[in-house]
Image: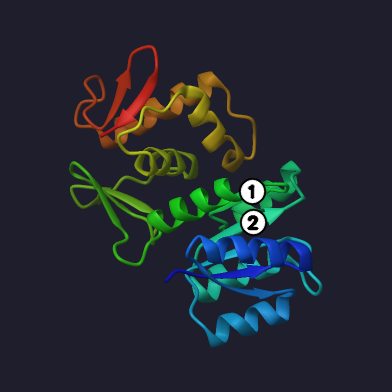
Amino acid sequence: MTKILLIEDDKTIVSTLTEFLVREGFAVRSASGQSAALSALDSERFDLVLLDISLSDGNGFAVCSAIKSDYHIPVIFLTASGDEYSTVTGFDLGADDYIPKPFRPRELVSRIKNILRLTGSASSIVRLGDVEVDTVRGIALKNGRDLYLSALEYRLLLVFINNRGAVLTRTKLLESIWDIAGEFVNDNTLTVYIKRLREKIEDDPQEPRIIKTVRGLGYKVD
């Protein structure tokens, strides 16, 4: 059973969210502040952390930094602090996702499962033809050689992997990658990043076999 540590000081949210996640099949432990959270992480193994920025003691940024440095497990920020600075800071510290409050519980569960797929302990290697993506080390290899993807190129590749077989519109791709860039990503910029990614992962970028264009709709990775 997937074990989640919910680090949140609002008792109502803790109660409501814990009840919902348990019904969805997760095991949940909660902590209201930084010291209690780190103590829980020292005593138990968790698969994922849901983390607020404002805590009863300490702050979520410090906790995220400690988790990524010492425990190496996925972190999803759940916070009312939806400003650009907080979002970018969270990703800079290694957060795997960032969901502003209020959020829809079922969307949260979907995103938890997406992150667990990308960072799952069963296998950290995802293969796309002769490209291997190591989601633990955060690197992509082609024929054993590092492709040296930028942060945004890597994020874009993960979005395709996480939606394998589905057609992704340009709007969906923009929504998925803009926040990690630290600046607004427009449609032209998306075109540039898809072109750069194809140049690195495809044998022939002019005839892509991994990231395919679906005319009039978007893109798809089979």
x, y (%) of residue 134? Answer: 33, 56
Which residue is under mark 1? Answer: 99
Q: Quadrant of the C terminus?
A: top left
Residue 77, label in figure: 2
Q: CA distance from mark 2 to mark 1?
A: 6 Å
Circle 1: element type: strand
Looking at the image, which residue sits at the far top?
A: 216
Residue nearest the observer in this picture, 188 or 125:
125
Check if mark 2's residue and mark 1's residue have beta carbons within 8 Å. Answer: yes
Query: Quadrant of the rendered structure where residue 58 is?
Result: bottom right
Residue type of the residue flagged with mark 2? Phe
x, y (%) of residue 7? Answer: 67, 69
Going from N to C along the chain, the mark reached first, 2 or 1, is 2
Considering only vertical position in the picture, is 6 above or below 152? below
Numbered circles on residues, count: 2
Whether residue 10 is visible, yes or no, is: no
x, y (%) of residue 111? Answer: 51, 49
Q: Quadrant of the N terminus?
A: bottom left
